[in-house]
Amino acid sequence: MTTTTSTEPKVPAPRGGSADAADGRERVSAFWSLSRAMLLGMKRDRTATFFILLFPLVFLVFFGSVTKGSSTPHAKVAQVGAVKLFDSMTGEGRTELDKVLTITRTDDEAGTLEKVRKGDFDAMITQGADGKVELRYTAADQVRAGALQGIFNSVVQEANQQATHQAPAYVVDAQQVEDKSLKPIQFLTPGLLGWAVATGAVFGAALTLVNWRKTKVLRRLRLAPISAGTVVSSRILVSLLTAFLQTGVFLVVATSFFGLKLTGNWWLVLPLVACATLAFMSIGLLAGSVARTEEAANGISQVIVLPMSFLSGSFFPMDGAPGWLQTVSKVMPLHYLVNSAQSVLTRGGGVMDALPTMGGLLLFAAVLTGIAWKLFRWEDA
């Protein structure tokens, strides 16, 4: 019996590095496949596309159109009989007065006063034989009423100085610190953009999570060789792409049609939006983790997003709000996004105006994501 000794080299066992590389390629492939599926799903869902991308833009177009030609409030004033204070004004003073007041002459004092009450005129002015000038105005529009009182006080003060031939003891030189071409769109765009980003991130994360759990997509993903981190990271990518698309559309529309003027550091809004998207997405993940139905997820998201939008200065400034309400506003992440976005987009703010907000938003996202992770369920109980 002949014994043969094999001289073929032994094949070494596969090294761990090759297995890790293959596993890494599988994870990357799964990540891009999930991201592509989410993007295609959003593209097919026209309702979601409208409410996430187009609905906020409708608000920008509406408010931008309403405020596009806004300036100092122009008031309609009825002059009853002769009013020497106005009749004697000529030259540049009269020209400036006509820019802010439309003066209509009438002789019916009682009828004119009734028209002021009804809102046909903003004010009525009369002058008695003793020279006393009487102003009767409606307070229905308090901004216009305040402007009217300021105009008349200025006219009376100037007339008194001319009558006494005395120069004013004090002169005020008032100038705004911003560009003189500053328009309301400079304040509206950052606020509405913040609201759009918050709405898209919260609703996108919450409704997707609940829908996937309801349709058993999460169950299939759990059985597949895909980690929860891959699922979440693909959702993050889609949310970031959506937020950047919203930002681009907002800035293009606002600059092209409504005269938005961007400052030199406007690009800082991009990392701000990225950090904010993570923060608001964590809210959506938390809502999606506790909600069992899409209706419940929608309701929870509405309860969070709507008050936050109104209390964070997205639609109107909070400067005149009560102190306790301003304190509540400062608890909300949208408040800081809106303020920082206004600073870098329209007020010439720099890195230090955005960096603290970015850090706070990332910390907020980490805390809420940790809570959502603890409450996360692959399937309905």
Image: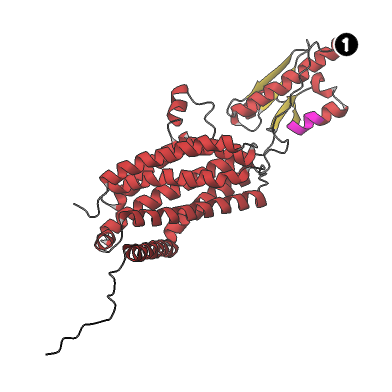
Label 1, residues with CA under 10 Å away: few <14, some 14-19, many ≥20: few
Which of the pair 94/65 is nearer the observer? 65
Q: Is residue 160 left or right of residue 306?
A: right
**Image position, residue 87 (x, y; %):** 83, 23
Residue under the image location 47 percent in, 23 percent down: 322
**Image position, residue 306 (x, y; %):** 42, 40
Q: In which quadrant of the rendered view does residue 225 lie?
A: bottom left
Residue under the image location 76 percent in, 14 percent down: 128
Residue under the image location 67 percent in, 26 percent down: 147
Q: Is residue 44 left or right of residue 152?
A: left
Q: Secondary structure at mark 1?
A: loop
Which of the pair 265/204 is nearer the observer? 265
Q: Quadrant of the N terminus?
A: bottom left
Task: Give the residue at mark 1.
Answer: 165
Which of the pair 115/242 is nearer the observer? 242
Residue 100 lies in the magenta-colored region: yes
Which residues are the magenta region? 96-101
